[in-house]
Image (cartoon, rainbow, N blue to C red):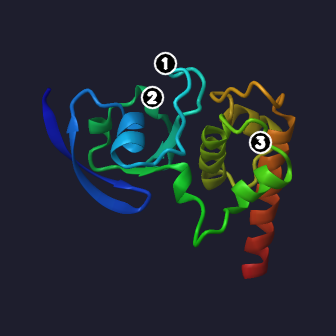
Amino acid sequence: MAKRLVNLSVNGRAREDAVADHTLLLDYLREQLGLTGTKRGCDGGECGACTVLVDGQPQLSCITLACRCEGREVSTIESLAQDGRLSALQSAFHEKLGTQCGFCTPGMVMAAHALLLSNPQPDEAQIRQALSGNICRCTGYVKIIESVQAAAATLAGAKGEAA
């Protein structure tokens, strides 16, 4: 099994790890780094449970080789909370009941986070589009969309106060 040294940043920390050529980013994160917030769902890039951000863009970690992330920034659900406090998006998912069983939640939150980074005030259609690669079998998506809308409103309010 061939291995190579991979240099990347994970959740803001520079890393250099020996990684087998065939190691999926999902397995690297969960097994090598212990970041188990990213979930293994379909193993085929269909459900979105494994969504992480690579250079700020949503990426399915179950179909991405870890070595393909050389020199890139990978962000997982663990990166969002700061000093033990949930992010505005995580809080909104909790408060607006965007989480049911919770299995899809990390992927949904990361896809929504990417959207809010690029578009802080998305409309409902834009939210639906951004989350279209993430499947939830519990909620019917209404509460998830409301959660993203609430987070956007909270973030807009925080920016208004800071100005």
CA neighbours of label 2 inside 10 A, class few (<14), some (14 to 19), many (20+): many
Q: Specify whether residue 163 is in view.
A: no
Disc 3 or 2, which lies upstream in sequence? 2
The one nearer the camera, 30 or 80, is 30
Q: Secondary structure at mark 3?
A: loop
Q: Which residue is tagged 2?
A: 62
Using the image, determine if residue 44 lies above or below residue 134. Answer: above
Which residue type carries mark 1? Answer: Gly
x, y (%) of residue 43?
48, 21
The one nearer the camera, 67 or 130, is 67
Asked if the residue at tag 1 contacts the one at tag 3, i.e. Cβ–Cβ closer than 8 Å, the answer is: no
CA neighbours of label 3 inside 10 A, class few (<14), some (14 to 19), many (20+): many
Q: Is residue 9 left or right of residue 17?
A: right
Using the image, determine if residue 93 lies above or below residue 103. Answer: below
Q: In the drawing, what numbered circle is on residue 99?
A: 3
Q: CA distance from mark 1 to mark 2?
A: 7 Å
Q: Say which quarter of the image contains residue 87.
A: bottom right
Q: Secondary structure at mark 1?
A: loop
Q: Is residue 117 left or right of residue 55?
A: right
CA neighbours of label 1 inside 10 A, class few (<14), some (14 to 19), many (20+): few
Q: Residue at x 59, y 30 (%)?
A: 48
User: Which image quarter holds the N terminus?
Assistant: top left
Which residue type carries mark 2? Answer: Cys
Q: CA distance from mark 3 to mark 2?
A: 22 Å
x, y (%) of residue 84?
61, 69
Disc 1 or 2, which lies upstream in sequence? 1
Using the image, determine if residue 149 lies above or below residue 141. Answer: below
Q: Which residue is tagged 1?
A: 44
Q: In the drawing, what numbered circle is on residue 152?
A: none
x, y (%) of residue 109?
65, 45
